[in-house]
Image (cartoon, rainbow, N blue to C red):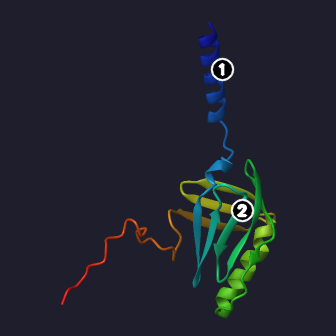
Amino acid sequence: MKFRLLTAAACALALGACGNDTPNPELLKGANFVSAQPGVDITLSFDPTEMRVYGRVVNLYNGGYTVDGDQIHFDGFASTMMMGEPETMEIEQEYFQFMPTVETYELSDGKLTLIGTDGKEIIFTQVETLPGEDTAPAPSDAPAPETVSE
């Protein structure tokens, strides 16, 4: 009897979840995203264990975030202060100004859309590794160097 009651409760919860279009914030953890902009890629990674993000436009940046359902808020970012091409620096500045205005997000089909309070959006594509990340095998996996005897 208890088993039937538990099964019925599990089915009811599963059916209730089917109609829920709210994104699962857990899917952000550990995920990497790229948004191709003119002359520069914007990267955005969600830390797998802490409520932190990091990435690169021209400069490296990091900051905190909070998420509740489809609501997301990014704290102010800390960044390095390297100079780049004027066009890419302008894109970076616009991105850093946009991120604190983000209030909702959509995540589906490998696309992350961040939506600001004014309706402005930026769309990212999910990737396994970020551009420029070293994908070479770990030293223990790398073949031993050949020795040449003369």
**Residues at marks 2 and 1 touching, judged by CB atoms closer than 8 Å:** no
Please state the horizontal and vertical placement of residue 113, each as a whole percent of the image: 65, 61
Q: How many marks?
A: 2
Q: Is residue 104 visible?
A: yes
Residue type of the residue flagged with mark 1? Ala
Please state the horizontal and vertical placement of residue 75, each as a whole percent of the image: 80, 66
Residue 90, placed above or below residue 107: below
Q: Which residue is mark 1?
A: 9
Mark 1 neighbour class, 10 Å CA radius: few under 14, some 14 to 19, many 20 or more: few
Residue at the far front: name it: 150
Residue 22, placed above or below residue 96: above
SS for tag 1? helix
Separation (CA) of disc 2 from disc 1: 35 Å
Could you say which is closer to the camera, residue 18 or residue 29? Answer: 29
Mark 2 neighbour class, 10 Å CA radius: few under 14, some 14 to 19, many 20 or more: some
What residue do we see at 58% from left, 60% from top?
Answer: 111
Of callouts 2 and 1, which one flags the residue occurring earlier in the amino acid sequence? 1
Q: Which residue is mark 2?
A: 52
What residue do we see at 57% from left, 85% from top?
Answer: 39
Residue 147, placed above or below residue 24: below
Q: Is residue 50 left or right of residue 36?
A: right
| Quadrant of image for the N terminus | top right
Q: Which mark is residue 36?
A: none
Residue 122: quadrant of the picture? bottom right
Residue 58, placed above or below residue 114: below
What residue do we see at 77% from left, 75% from top?
Answer: 78
- Of circles 2 and 1, the one toward us is 2
Residue type of the residue flagged with mark 2? Arg
Please state the horizontal and vertical placement of residue 69, each as a whole percent of the image: 73, 47
Please state the horizontal and vertical placement of residue 70, each as a whole percent of the image: 73, 51
